[in-house]
Image: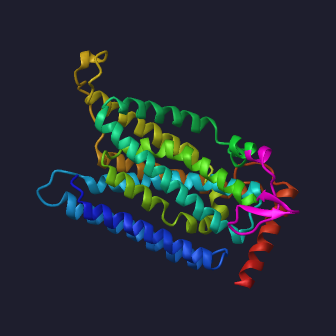
Amino acid sequence: MNVSTLEWSITIGVTIAVLLFDIVIVARKPHEPSIKECSIYLSIYVSMAIAFGLWVIYFHDGPGKDEDYGLQFFAGWLTEYSLSVDNLFIFLIIMASFKVPRKYQQEALLVGIIIAIVFRGIFIALGAVAINNFSWVFYLFGAFLIYTAVKLVADTNHDDDGDNAVVKFARKRFNVSEQWDGLKLVIRENGKRAITPMFLVIIALGTTDLLFALDSIPAIYGLTKEPYLVFTANVFALMGLRQLYFLLGDLLKRLIYLSQGLSFLLAFIGVKLLLHALHENELPFINGGEHVPVPEIPTLLSLGVIVGTLSITAIVSLTVSGRRVRAGLNPDGTERTPEQEAEEAAALAEREANRKQD
């Protein structure tokens, strides 16, 4: 794919402009966005991603070109978007575990998204270098994705993700305040410096983003080898993530089979990578260093599997969890507790109070 310096410059410039716009909007007045506000921004970001994919098809696939870069972008974007939704579920747990006030959650999410873009940019660059210099890296990517898929389907309980080892270390080493003060990370309390709960939230979000980057970058390199498409698919997947968090709200908890669906997708892409590695094989201890004549999975089939898996996962999740909720249970089938009802009532009261202030 021949991407000009101008295209890269415009892409990075637009990404920075969108982030700065988000920062200005959030910093101007921290608040919980309304459903209307979230819907408008999210529809704009999704439309931008679709328009970009069509632009890639028109300008880079074009007449007389035997390429499918547009399909590669859409497949990568949908995969990264679905992984980002799973990331949102972890964000939801982190917000709940630290009891982040609703009006400050936008700020925390925005910082988390910026950290995610930085981490993914680093891993995209490292992945591109590895692919260009070592063809056998596809074996590692494929094996890692299959391992991740097995681990994901076996471990769907993320309740301790908000208090990981890094957060526990920070709690132990530093004086931690209970006072929230926007995005301030350090305050003076009783004459001493103390880190705010927001500091711990950002640490939790940052370490979570790092782990998700380790999964998502090998996954998208299984769908396209073009760093430009890898970068743009990740950027478009992260755009609107903050609005999606508030728009979906408790609906995130009803996507009870999301981990299983993502596990299948990661395993599928892992197999695709291993087949590609065998097809391009140069390792001397495999088939004498010669290419192995195995079939490769085309991009169109990959896109179909991705769309089909996500659709089935969403339909089955919402159907089963809906029945459980109507029966008075939690979406995961467990009994509702008085503590949960009290927390939900408090969250609803806080939400109403914030809306009245706005």
- Which residue is painted at 23% across and 25% down in the image? 291
Of 117 and 266, which appears nearest the observer? 117
For the point 25% across and 15% down, the residue is 288
Q: Is residue 129 above or below residue 48?
A: above
Residue beneath the point at 28% across and 63% down: 7
Image spot of residue 231 (x, y percent): 38, 54
Q: Which residues are magenta?
A: 170-195
Q: Nearer the viewer, residue 106 or 347?
A: 106
Occupied quadrant, residue 243: bottom right
Q: Could you tell me which quadrant the C terminus lies in?
A: bottom right
Q: Position of residue 357 (x, y in %)?
A: 74, 84
Any part of residue 311 in sight: no
The residue located at (50%, 71%) in the rendering is 20
The furthest residue to the front: 191
Question: How did the renderer colour the structure?
Answer: rainbow
> Does the stretch in magenta take in 171?
yes
Q: Position of residue 40 (x, y in %)?
A: 51, 77
Total numbered circles? 0
- Please indicate whether residue 148 sits to the left or right of residue 72 in the image: right
Is 322 situated left or right of 309 in this image? right
Quarter of the image for residue 354 reads: bottom right
- Where residue 309 appears, as percent x and y from the top left, is 46, 48
In the depicted structure, whether residue 319 falls above or below residue 152: below
* Residue 25 seen from this side: yes
Q: Is residue 205 left or right of residue 123?
A: right
